[in-house]
Amino acid sequence: MIHQLEPITALATAPGIGAIAVIRVSGEGAISLTNKLFRGKDLTQQPSHTAHFGTFRSSADAIIDEVLVTVFQSPKSFTKEDVVEISCHGSEFIIRQILTELTSAGARLAKPGEFTQRAFLNGQFDLVQAEAVADVIAADSAASHRAALSQLRGGFSKQLTELRQQLIDFVALVELELDFGEEDVEFAKRDQLRGLMQTIRGVIQPLIDSFTAGNVIKNGVPTVIVGKPNAGKSTLLNALLNEEKAIVSDIPGTTRDVIEDELFIDGVRFRLIDTAGLRDTTDTIEAIGVARTRQQIDKAALVVYLFDGTTTTPDDLLQAIAELDESGKPYVLVGNKADAVSDATRQTLDGSPYALSAVANVPGNVPTAPRIIWISAKDAQIDALKTVLSARARTDSAMQAGSSVVTNARHLQHLTATDDALAHAIAAIDAGTSADWIAMDLRIALRELGELTGEVTTDDLLASIFGRFCIGK
């Protein structure tokens, strides 16, 4: 059943002055309400999905603007209600006037995310897909767009909904067994029930595992540039960003605080973090910077260790590799000042046994990647590093097109709780536990899956989710 609620209206395009703006009206009477203020064709007599040119007028019949009005009749609209979209000139004054007239005529200003909430309530899509609307709008890289679009098109939620329905059928049989508690009957075949739960866990567990990569896709890859003072970290940051973001100086310890910016490589966002040089120092301020550098390493998804190829010895590099290995973070060894490094030095650093330990930590473990990436930050000769960074992202399965990935902490919470409940139910079956204990775990699993997809909801949950949306979405 499609519920036509009271008409609501809001600006659907970004606020501010522009060539055009789109104002959306949705709900019962949206078409007739707009028709009262529109001079052109009778909108109530026009077929769905048609656009009509005319003038938008005040209640006093004064022309406010020339507009193009598009009509969408229920249920063939985003909200499944009657919807009108008014395209007008992007003047803030015109927008205010049109919204004022619409509210005076009987519409109400929409709350944040209310259009999408109505679409969800009317069965246009499930809750995971509804949340993906905001993610698609916020996507700022190819990877985040791909992940959001996958969820918007159903992603993993449709598969989980189908499996949940199968689980409901089994739960009904287990509940029926409880009604015959005094009799030794088994309506739900335990081997079939166990197999279904294992299938569901087989879908859920990779999704749980994908959250770390999904969080990186959504928020960017935290990439920390570390090394000793004067290795060229700030110069490298500037070269990657193609701007003078960080102060560059020959004086050791110039960078004393964390400097952060973003870089897009092949559609993936990297959050680059330049840090203070790693060394023991008696300078109080510099020591604070070094401590912050170590904190950033702990938070990083990837570490770029930069060293001066003209001054670094094999022992220096061996010590650095040992510290990086201890951190447990994936890292890239980057030799700077390649233009001034002799072939003999390169061969020594590239071919020594200690360098072999770094090959497993080359991002993505790319077979063709060198053990040490040689660059010249000063001359912006950094393509080799960009290639390796891109390869790191591309070899992550969660970055691949068509893969389902979890980017939302709420989804992770429900998936984890579902998996735990199913694990307990399987253990109960294996232990020969009575049906009432099995049923308890199955109910928890059903509730968690239902809250994930929106089949089980509360007003507070919907308010929390859609309250984070933009007004007009």
Image: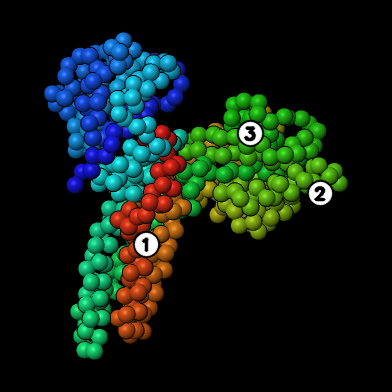
Marks 1 and 2: in contact by CB < 8 Å? no
Marks 1 and 3: in contact by CB < 8 Å? no
Q: Position of residue 149 (x, y in %)?
A: 34, 41
Q: How is the image coloured?
A: rainbow
Please name the residue that numbered disc 3 is placed on: 237
SS category of the residue bearing label 2:
loop
Please name the residue that numbered disc 1 is placed on: 448
Local crowd at mark 2 within 10 Å, few (<14), some, or many (≥20)?
Answer: few
- Horizontal arrangement in the rendering, residue 323 relative to residue 72 (left or right): right
Q: Quadrant of residue 283?
A: top right
Q: Nearer the viewer, residue 298 or 32?
A: 32
Residue drawn where x is 32% and y is 80% of the image: 436
Sequence-wise, the earlier of marks 2 and 1 is 2
- Looking at numbered disc 2 in the image, what kind of residue is underneath it? Asp
Please name the residue that numbered disc 2 is placed on: 280
- Looking at numbered disc 3 in the image, what kind of residue is underneath it? Leu
Q: Quadrant of residue 13?
A: top left
Residue drawn where x is 65% and y is 47% of the image: 296
| Marks 3, 1: nearer the viewer | 1
SS category of the residue bearing label 1:
helix
Q: Position of residue 383 (x, y in %)?
A: 54, 33
Residue drawn where x is 65% and y is 45% of the image: 305
Residue 137 can be seen, yes or no: no
Q: Position of residue 355 (x, y in %)?
A: 63, 52
- Horizontal arrangement in the rendering, residue 285 relative to residue 111 (left or right): right
Real-space Cα separation, disc 3 to disc 2, in angstroms:
23 Å
Figure check: 384 above or below 66? below
